[in-house]
Image: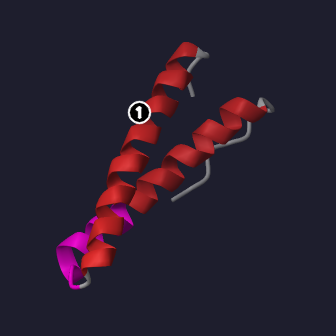
Amino acid sequence: MSSPPHTGDADKDFVSHVIPHHQGAIEMAEVELMKYDKDPELKRLARNIINAQHDEIGFMQRWQAKHGGK
């Protein structure tokens, strides 16, 4: 995963860098659920990560749209 370029706007840069970070966390949690899924606590953690990070990505994408895109 490549890092988005810096714009000089700290808020926009923060959001543009955190979105791919969260997407990576979702992908790792999905692998845990699909391939391993043995420990109930890790299963719950993976589901929580997917839900929370998905919601946060949505928030950040809406923020980007409101504040001039990516």
* 58 horizontally vs 2: left or right: left
User: In the rendered structure, which amino acid carries the disc numbered 1?
Assistant: Gly
Q: Is residue 62 left or right of residue 9?
A: left
Q: Is residue 23 left or right of residue 35?
A: right
Q: Position of residue 8 (x, y in %)?
A: 81, 32
Q: Which residues are magenta?
A: 27-38
Residue 66 picture location, percent across and down: 54, 14
Q: Secondary structure at mark 1?
A: helix
Q: Quadrant of residue 28?
A: bottom left
Up the image or down, 22 lies above or below 61; here it is below
Q: Residue furthest right?
A: 8
Left or right, residue 69 beside residue 12: left
Q: 55 or 27, which lies in front? A: 55
Residue under label 1? 58
Question: Can you give x and y, in whole percent of width and height, for residue 6 in the image?
Answer: 73, 40
Residue 33 vs residue 5, the one in the foreground: 33
Q: Residue at (36%, 67%) from the top-left corner?
A: 45
Quadrant the C terminus occupies: top right
Q: Give the quadrant of residue 68.
A: top right
Q: Is residue 29 highlighted in magenta?
A: yes
Give the camera-side residue of 70 and 50: 50
Magenta span: chief secondary structure: helix
Residue lying at 68% horizontally and 42% vertically, measured from the top left: 5
Q: Nearer the viewer, residue 7 or 34?
A: 34
